[in-house]
Image: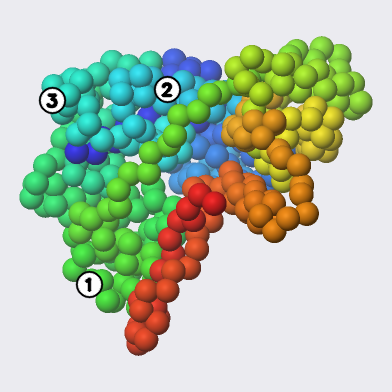
Amino acid sequence: MVVCVHLPRFELVVAAGGRSEIAQQTLAGRPLAIEPLAGAEQRVGEVSGAAEACGVARGMALGEALARCPELVLVPGNPVEVAQEWEALLCSLESIGAAVEPSGPGLAYFETDGLRSLHGTHAAAIAAARAALTRPARIGAGPTRFCALAAAMAVRSRRPLTLQGAEAGRWLATRPVALLGFREQTAALVAPLTRLGVRTLGELTKLGRAALADRFGEPGVLAHRLASGQDSPLCVRRPEEWLHESMDVGDASSGEALKRVLSVLVSRLLAQQQRKGRTLRAVTLTAQLLAGGGWQEQVVFRQALSDPERIWLALSVRLPLLPAPAATLGLSVERFGPPANEQSELLNSQRAQRATRNARLREAIAQTRAVAGRDAALRAVCVDQHSRVPERRVVLAPIAEL
């Protein structure tokens, strides 16, 4: 059974200073929205229920949002604190033994089948997950990821909703097609399906797989599978050590002085004993701004590094992207590389050249996966080259370790 943990408007709650602040603003009748970052596209972020009632939606242009709701209150976004709070919640779920698949801030999934030996029953595992969370959350359970999401979105109390067997399929058919907006591949289908008069997932399945594939392509096929109660297995994250260093910059909030603060952070991060001599493949540069809010930038190195000078050079060019003067600068490790002492001498032999080529391929594959995810690097495998169907001739498979 798959369990969905949903924290509504998580980014807005964190940016506004907590649920108590949101409650006070809501009781006062004030619509809230996360303001766009300076230098980014001027579109509002997560919005409150009062703002949605006025016709404001996430991703709407700022000018249109203010035109629809002139009393809209803009809250500075804080992606740094959102990432830290969300990481803490994911670690809380993993502390009960769950293998978690994060699907964005405020939304995560895990399976309870492997937790029955620890907690006894599915209900006990769900109760342990709720007890481990430090924030109130909506929890739903079902046979697939999408069913669990639909159950969590329908919950309006602290009691979780569990769907099983044929009941899950019948109940899923009554849910609105807006649930497809929570899946990146099918989010673009919500607006055209609404214009066509398709309101529920049951009406979507009646259209048929062939009609949806002809009109929308692969996203239409996926939408039909989700509405029919089918979904892919969970892709759980691999827990890794998280190293972090931060420093108050004081008067060195910008310019060359900020670069010297960055140099100190790099030296401190490399000096931590938990690094154990490993190189750094991807890091995240964060800042708390003097004007409020936060900023972060992920940097993936072309090659796993342990040289502080080269790391500083790669990070210093990102400091001009700061939208405002910084109050605190932070640096954390996202992905580690191999130990620095594993580099061997280059010999003029065919075997050494092949080993060097494989090492470079490993570096390229690791960099690509660090930037775009685990399935970013695939290889084409010929299955049936004489087939008349192009999709059966070649399939994509993960690249094995070289």
Disc 1 and disc 2: Cα gap in Å? 41 Å
Q: Which residue reaches farthest left?
A: 166
Q: Quick one: label 1 or label 2, which is nearer the N terminus?
A: 2
* Residue 233 visible in the shown view: yes
> The residue tagged with tag 3: helix, strand or loop?
loop
Residue corresponding to mark 3: 121
Q: Earlier in the sequence, mark 1 or mark 3?
A: 3
List x then y, in percent, for residue 239: 45, 29
Of badges 1 and 2, the one in the foreground is 2
Q: Left or right: where does residue 39 sit relative to residue 58?
A: right
Residue type highlighted by circle 1: Gly
Kindly identify the residue that appears in the image at 45 percent across and 56 percent down. Answer: 398
x 46%, y 38%: residue: 104
**Marked residue nearer the N-terminal end (2 or 3):** 2
Camera-side residue: 270 or 59?
Answer: 270
x and y percentages locating residue 81 in the rendered image: 57, 23
Residue at the (23%, 55%) spot, across then down: 230
Q: Which residue is mark 2?
A: 91
Residue bearing the label numbered 1: 208
The amino acid type found where label 2 is placed reads Cys
State the SS at label 1. Answer: loop
Q: Quadrant of residue 50?
A: top left
- Residue extending furthest toward the right: 256
Q: Are marks 1 and 2 in contact (CB under 8 Å)?
A: no
Near mark 1 (Cα within 10 A), the count class, few <14, some 14-19 or many ≥20, is: few
Q: Quadrant of residue 77?
A: top right
Local secondary structure at mark 2: helix
Question: Taking 27 as reference, is 69 left or right?
Answer: right
